Amino acid sequence: MTANKKNVPEFSELSLFDISPSLASFLPEDFCTSNQIALLDDPSSKDTQNIRVGVLDIEDQDLIAKAQEIIGEKIKPVQLNDYEISKALSLIYNIEADSNAGPNLQLNSSSEIDFSKDRKPNLILQDILSAALQRRATDIHIENYNEDVDMRLRIDGNLHQVTTSLSPSNIQRVIACLKIVCDLDHLERKKSQDGRFSAQYDDGEHSRKIDFRASIVPGNHGQEAVIRVLDPHRFILDINELGMPANILNSYKRIVNYPNGLILTTGPTSSGKTSTLYASVQSLVNRGLKIMTAEDPVEYEMNKVNQKSIDEFMDFSDYIRSFLRQNPDIILVGEIRDPETAEIVIKASTTGHLVLSTLHTRSAIGTVSRLRNLDIPDDYISDNLLGAIGQRLVRKICEECKEEDPQTEEMLSLFYDSKDNVNHYHGKGCESCNGSGYKGMIGIYELFFPNEEISTAISTGASVAELNNMAKEQGFVPLVDNALNKAHEGLTSLEEISLRIGPKFPHAN
């Protein structure tokens, strides 16, 4: 099918070939532009024994076989980079080079997944991205198995299987296409790579820019990808719209307006922490303050906020140190991951800055224990911790198919210590919610803000259990109780609370 791999040069340059419009008749323009392949020799020349074709990946046997079938002659793949292929196509077909520098992705709300056998890689990727936006997905998972390829969309926190035209024969070409739009090394197959790109999405009324973040990893059966959808319409930038209970919202807005100190947002991955941080920062933008952020990476660009993404050269602690020399008023740190970052964050909050960040803990009060584990002394915690907000995202019951849901004694015993007289609901599943019974998500919150008595207890080494009891005596409402209030209002179900937060009485019989 192709020449022996040992005889194929690892890399060539376009200047070595005589490229002209006379080559246009041998390979269709559409085939070449969509697959990033360029004819480099004239098949009609008697002097050419092996016709050379420029490709991104000389191991793409399916693409090489298809080009060979169209030309009708044996071909020899030559590895070029995407810029040189783009340049070659511009010379052959008399088109602008920039138009082929990367796949042209046209996303819209009316497109449907096309299952044509020879669907082009850029169009398959376009279908996938459009489908994700149509279905309100936050993540796209492309998974490669022995003789199968799966695509799943994370919608309202759960993964849903979606049938596409992805197959074992084209998945690597689609991932190569993804790498090109992310400006990654399409030849690297042994290491993971992260990148991002943007595309315009036509929702039927307006066209808007959507950002995507891609993570590509090698696997036993080829490369796999996860694409995060960063739709600006999904970001809540108004602190009043986060869904916090009124008592928590009022207290949180007070501590966010402190001139200095540390505010932490806690919870697992995909619990809405970034939205809370962004909404908090946005509430401070118009106060004439200098706000600087270090994120991994920047997910949404805010006006009048100096945002930085960490990288291999600058991590969180590096940025915070540099920020302290930039005279900021407010510093946002994407996550406190290690003792070094924790130490510099505490230093910043001690020296007159308001610092907002996140921690991975199970509860708001658990931030005290986590900071201790990061080698922060108790007196520093008590002096600088303004408050910690714990949160989760739970699915909302679909309003189109909501109905009463009598609960079993076993389920009720997980949440109530006496007979429950409150109605509960679930969604039976309908077309509006794709049969899931849920549509959309809502935030569940708890707020721990130490008063003088609790701060004194922290400074003397009080345990988290002791702090929890003291906080409850002073009105602290745990996460699960806030969730149960949402269930009583018919917004979510006990099953969902059990899944996302856990029972109130885990050892109930």
Image: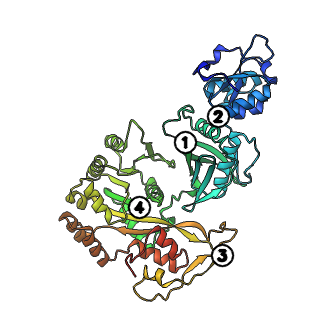
Task: Write the residue at 54% across / 45% down.
Answer: 213
Left or right: 348, with 137 as reference point: left
Image location (x, y in percent) of residue 165: 70, 47
For marks 1 and 3, the one nearer the N-term is 1
Residue identifier under label 4: 267
Task: Write the residue at 62% across / 39% down.
Answer: 172
Q: Secondary structure at mark 3?
A: loop
Mark pair 2, 1: CA separation: 13 Å
Residue identifier under label 1: 196
Task: Write the residue at 25% across / 58% down.
Answer: 372
For marks 4 and 2, the one nearer the N-term is 2
Return the mark for residue 401. 3
Q: The residue under label 3 is which amino acid type?
A: Cys
Q: The residue under label 1 is which amino acid type?
A: Arg
Label 4 crowd bin: few (<14), some (14–19), many (20+), radius 10 Å:
many
Image location (x, y in percent) of residue 485: 47, 78
Residues under numbered marks 3 and 2 in contact, where contact means CB atoms less than 8 Å apart:
no
For marks 2 and 1, the one nearer the N-term is 2
Mark pair 1, 4: CA separation: 25 Å
Q: In the image, is residue 183 above or below residue 275?
A: above
Report the front residue among 224 and 462: 224
Mark pair 4, 2: CA separation: 38 Å
Residue identifier under label 2: 102
For marks 3 and 2, the one nearer the N-term is 2
Q: In the image, is residue 401 above or below residue 273?
A: below
Mark pair 3, 2: CA separation: 44 Å
Name which quarter of the figure residue 479 lies in.
bottom left
Quarter of the figure that contains the N terminus? top right
Report the front residue among 413 and 239: 413
